Image (cartoon, rainbow, N blue to C red):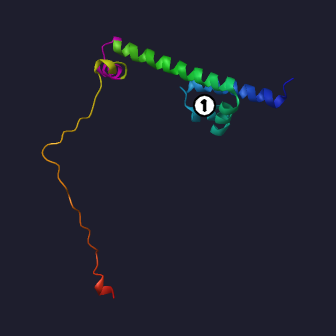
C-alpha cells in the first residue's frame, strides 16, 4: 500500500506532466504552476523511468504540434517556413548553407614584436 507522501508525489508528477503540456515544455513555468523546484523535476527524471518516459512523450507531442504548424505555413506558400524546412530536411539535396573561404595569393608570414611599455634600464 502506497504512503500518503508517495501518493502526493505521484499526483504532483501527473500535474507536472499536464503543466509541461500547457507551457509547451517550459520546465521553469511548469514548476511554478505546481509549486515545485526545477531540481525536484530533474530528480524525478533521474529516479523514475516511467516519469522520464512520459516527459519525453510530452516533448514529442510538442514537436508534433509545432511541425503541424510549420506544415500549415508551408501549405499557405509562406517563403520563410519553406526555406527553413528545406535547409533542415533537404540537406541531402543541396539545400544547405555553407560558408566558404578562399585564399588568394601566396601565404604570408607575419612577425609580431612586442615591446615593453617601459624601459627596463630606467627602473634600475
Residue 106, compared with residue 13, is above or below; it is: below
Percent across and percent down for residue 36 are 67, 36
Q: Residue at x 75, y 30 (%)?
A: 9
Say whether residue 82 is magenta: yes
Which residue occupies 33% across, 21% down? Answer: 91
| Foreground residue among 40 and 8 | 40
Determine the image quadrant of residue 121: bottom left
Tell me where the magenta segment starts and ends, as one range.
75-87
What residue is drawn where x is 35% and y is 11%? Answer: 75
Q: Residues within 10 Å of mark 1 (few under 14, many from 20)?
A: many
Find residue 49 and report its horizontal and vertical position in percent: 68, 26
Question: Magenta stretch mostly in which secondary structure?
Answer: helix
Q: Is residue 51 left or right of residue 107?
A: right
69 or 56: nearer the eye?
56
Looking at the image, which residue sits at the far bottom? 124
Question: Which structural element holds mark 1?
Answer: helix
Looking at the image, the residue that sits furthest to the right is: 1
Q: Which residue is mark 1?
A: 30
Residue for point 28% across, 75% down: 117
- Picture layout, residue 19 above or below residue 74: below
The answer to if 105 sits in the magenta stretch is no
Where is residue 2? Give x, y as percent: 84, 25
- Residue 46 position by quadrant: top right
Q: Position of residue 78 (x, y in %)?
A: 31, 17
Amino acid at each position: 500500500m502506497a504512503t500518503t507522501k508517495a501518493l502526493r508525489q505521484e499526483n504532483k508528477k501527473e500535474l507536472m506532466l499536464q503543466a509541461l503540456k500547457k507551457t509547451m515544455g517550459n520546465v521553469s513555468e511548469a514548476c511554478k504552476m505546481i509549486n515545485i523546484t526545477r531540481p525536484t523535476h530533474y530528480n524525478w527524471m533521474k529516479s523514475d523511468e516511467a516519469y522520464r518516459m512520459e516527459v519525453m512523450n510530452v516533448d514529442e507531442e510538442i514537436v508534433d504540434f509545432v511541425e503541424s504548424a510549420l506544415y500549415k505555413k508551408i501549405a499557405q506558400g509562406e517563403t520563410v517556413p519553406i526555406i527553413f524546412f528545406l535547409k533542415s530536411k533537404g540537406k541531402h539535396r543541396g539545400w544547405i548553407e555553407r560558408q566558404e573561404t578562399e585564399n588568394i595569393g601566396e601565404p604570408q608570414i607575419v612577425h609580431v614584436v612586442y615591446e615593453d611599455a617601459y624601459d627596463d634600464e630606467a627602473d634600475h
